[in-house]
Image (tube, grey):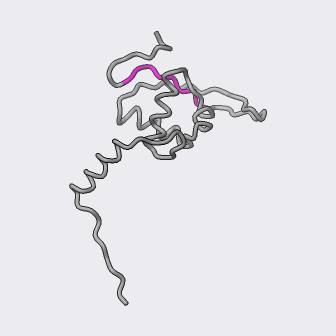
Amino acid sequence: MKPIKTKAPAGGAAGALRKHQTQLKFSDKSPATEAQRERIVQALRSRPQTSYDLRRMGCYQAPARVKELRDRFGFVIETTRITLVDRDGFSHPRAALYTLVSEPDGQRSQQRQ
């Protein structure tokens, strides 16, 4: 029996899928890229966050998500290298501390004013 080959969705269909995906609501524990970006933005609005903090929130690729927020979405996020000690007593030299400076709509972060 020959395997049946299927075609990928046409360009228009793929665009429709992307549009639909941006409208989805994600759970607090969702590993989806969009959900991770949203968690990072919400956390940065409250205070600066370390890469360790973001990892504990389920954002394991925080540097990639922060780069996307900067390059694709227009957020201004400052990165400072720090040494932190985690809750188990291990030192993490050159961990990132992310600070939200401004958002794409020109709004300045409350913590920087």
Magenta stretch in the rendered image? 96-103
Residue 99 magenta-highlighted: yes
- Image position of 2 with respect to 50: above or below: below
Q: Which residue lies furthest to the left in this view?
A: 12
Q: Where does the image place residue 9, in percent across and percent down from the top left?
A: 27, 62
- What is the number of callouts on the image? 0
**How far across and down, in percent of the image, does residue 47 sit?**
54, 20
Give the image quarter of residue 85. top right
- Residue at image position (37%, 17%) is 107
Q: Residue 50 appears at what percent x and percent y?
A: 59, 29
Q: Where does the N terminus fall, quadrant-wise?
A: bottom left
Q: Which of 51 and 18 is in front in this view?
A: 18
Q: Give x and y (percent) for residue 113.
A: 46, 9
Q: 80 and 106: which one is in front?
A: 106
**In the rendered view, would you say 109 is above or below 39?**
above
Residue 97 highlighted magenta (yes or no):
yes
**What residue appears at the point 23 percent right and 57 percent down from the top-left corner?**
11
Q: In this view, does 58 lie to the left or right of 21?
A: right
Q: List the single residue furthest toward the bottom.
A: 1
Taking the view exactly as shown, the residue that stands out farthest to the right is: 89
- Residue at x-position 29% and y-position 46%: 19
- The foreground one among 28 and 44 is 28
Q: Nearer the viewer, residue 62 or 33?
A: 33
30 to the left or right of 72: right
Magenta stretch, overall SS: strand
Is 90 on the left-hand or right-hand side of 17? Answer: right
Point 46% across, 26% down: residue: 77
